Image (spheres, grey):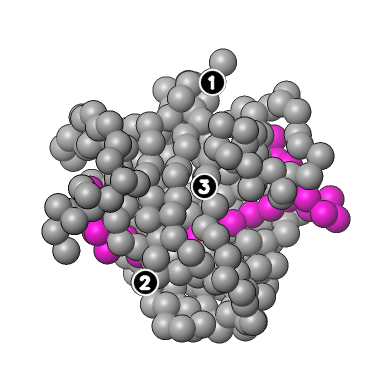
């Protein structure tokens, strides 16, 4: 579909600038016009989550039961301002170290972006193109790497996988059928990352409805033989054979991925 269509959409009428990367120039913010998502949320051990984010200058937030919140999201980007690609993100809900944690962290995720202290520290972010990898690593410091990624969302049925680039076998797979659900929003996101020794806070404006569902038969399978750091982190979080607490899926996702702001 021609990008000319999106130029008449107010959501994408936004000031742009260009940043250089090793794979070419990138127009900022990056626009995601036509996309699908399957996001699974998990309650994980707080201490294990904290151990994975502490060196980033971040602290995990506690949700009900004293657990931390981890997310695994599969994306199929059919049309963006840096071409089409697939992506998988694994992240922990956090705040900058020393910040006041909201009394109800999950409810605070509903706040407007300029009032949202709780964000996500991305642990792993495989993508399918060198251009997307270079942009993520060089502009934000995201832990991206290039790998084949499967994405199939048909009704409530989902099957997605990241292939270990060293072995050609599954590194992680999320598959099954989502349970009963209701219409719901896709929330704006705050992402924290460390780039060139500085902590960045990045705002992701999100649009498009989703189905918020019980997990049904959806489960995560993590390779038991892979030596890839992503597999090791997933095992450290206890996500092998894990059942999500809730899932969100949509074929109507749209995003504006903004540049990060340096935090003191």
What residue is disc 1 on?
263
Residue shown at 44%/73% (left/top)?
Answer: 160
Write down the region rendered in magenta.
58-84
Q: Is residue 85 visible?
A: no
Of badges 2 and 3, nearer the viewer stands 3
The residue at the far right in this view is 65
Q: CA distance from mark 3 to mark 1?
A: 19 Å
What residue is disc 3 on?
188
Q: Secondary structure at mark 1?
A: loop
Task: Note whether 147 is above or below 115 in the view shown.
Answer: below
80 falls in the magenta region: yes
Residue shown at 64%/82% (left/top)?
Answer: 180
Is 141 left, or right, of 42 in this rendering? left
- Mark 1 or mark 3, which is nearer the start of the sequence? 3
Viewer-side residue, 1 vs 150: 1
Image location (x, y in percent) of residue 76: 35, 64
104 falls in the magenta region: no
Image location (x, y in percent) of residue 158: 47, 79
What residue is disc 2 on?
150
- Characterize the local packing of mark 3: few (<14), some (14-19) or many (20 or more) Cα atoms within 10 angstroms: some
- Characterize the local packing of mark 1: few (<14), some (14-19) or many (20 or more) Cα atoms within 10 angstroms: few
- Mark 2 or mark 1, which is nearer the start of the sequence? 2
Task: Note whether 178 is above or below 170 in the view shown.
Answer: below
Residue shown at 55%/60% (left/top)?
Answer: 185
């Amino acid at each position: 579909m021609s990008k000319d269509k999106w130029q008449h959409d107010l959501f994408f009428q936004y000031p742009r600038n260009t940043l250089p990367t090793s794979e070419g120039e990138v127009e900022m913010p990056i626009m995601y016009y036509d996309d699908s998502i399957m996001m699974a949320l998990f309650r994980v051990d707080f201490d294990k989550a904290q151990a994975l984010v502490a060196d980033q200058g971040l602290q995990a937030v506690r949700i009900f039961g004293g657990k931390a919140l981890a997310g695994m999201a599969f994306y199929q980007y059919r049309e963006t301002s840096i071409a089409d690609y697939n992506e998988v993100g694994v992240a922990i809900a956090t705040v900058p170290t020393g910040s006041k944690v909201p009394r109800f962290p999950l409810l605070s995720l509903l706040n407007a972006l300029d009032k949202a202290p709780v964000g996500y520290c991305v642990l792993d972010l495989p993508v399918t193109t060198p251009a997307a990898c270079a942009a993520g690593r060089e502009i934000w410091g995201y832990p991206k790497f290039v790998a084949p990624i499967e994405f199939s969302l048909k009704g409530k049925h989902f099957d997605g996988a990241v292939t270990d680039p060293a072995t050609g076998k599954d590194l992680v797979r999320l598959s099954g059928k989502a349970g009963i659900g209701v219409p719901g929003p896709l929330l704006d996101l705050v992402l924290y990352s460390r780039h060139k020794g500085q902590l960045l806070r990045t705002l992701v404006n999100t649009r498009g409805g989703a189905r918020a569902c019980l997990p049904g038969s959806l489960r995560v399978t993590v390779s038991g033989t892979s030596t890839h750091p992503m597999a090791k982190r997933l095992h450290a979080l206890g996500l092998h054979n894990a059942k999500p607490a809730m899932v969100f899926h949509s074929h109507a996702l749209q995003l504006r991925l903004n540049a990060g702001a340096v935090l003191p």
